[in-house]
Amino acid sequence: MFVEVGSYDAKTRLPELLRKVEQGERFTITQRGRPIADLVPSADNARHSREEAVAAMRSMKRLVDVAPDTLEQWVEEGRR
């Protein structure tokens, strides 16, 4: 889901918006109410987040006995 932000507001809050984008949030920048651009995480950032999630799931598997099929199912659900 994208949050709409006016262009002037985006300009004045850019560092804050970039921190939020880095955490996975998405924004649509508007000008006079019209969507102009989307501010989204880069593909590299998304891949890095996926890798962190998989590593976290694997470490969780060590703490709790989780069947390999269950772990694969969690990964597949995360791709949707």
Image: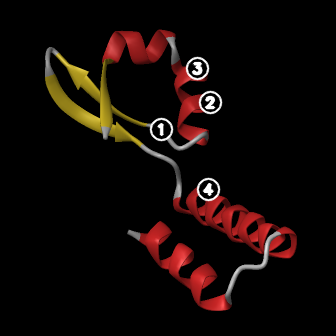
Where is mark 1, residue-wise? 25
- For disc 3, the neighbor class at 10 Å (few under 14, some 14 to 19, many from 20) is few
Q: Which corner quadrant of the image does residue 39 belong to? A: top left
Where is mark 3, residue-wise? 16
Mark 1 or mark 2: name the one nearer the start of the chain: 2
Mark 4 or mark 2: name the one nearer the start of the chain: 2
SS under mark 3? helix
Give the answer, above or below, for where 72 lies relative to 80.
below
- For disc 4, the neighbor class at 10 Å (few under 14, some 14 to 19, many from 20) is some
Mark 1 or mark 3: name the one nearer the start of the chain: 3
Where is mark 4, residue-wise? 45
Residues at circles 4 and 2 in contact by the CB criterion of under 8 Å? no
Residue at image point 53% right, 21% down: 14
Give the answer, above or below, for where 38 lies relative to 41.
above
Residue at image point 61% right, 62% down: 44
Q: Spatial distance from mark 4 to mark 2, Cα to Cα?
A: 12 Å
Q: Spatial distance from mark 3 to mark 2, Cα to Cα?
A: 5 Å
Q: Spatial distance from mark 1 to mark 2, Cα to Cα?
A: 9 Å
Mark 3 or mark 4: name the one nearer the start of the chain: 3
Q: Spatial distance from mark 3 to mark 4, Cα to Cα?
A: 17 Å
- What amino acid is labelled 3 in the image? Glu
Residue at image point 60% right, 40% down: 23
Q: Spatial distance from mark 1 to mark 3, Cα to Cα?
A: 11 Å
Res. 19 mark: 2
- What amino acid is labelled 1 in the image? Glu
Q: Position of residue 35 (x, y in %)?
A: 18, 31
Q: In this rendering, which labeled residue sits more in front, label 1 or label 3?
A: 1
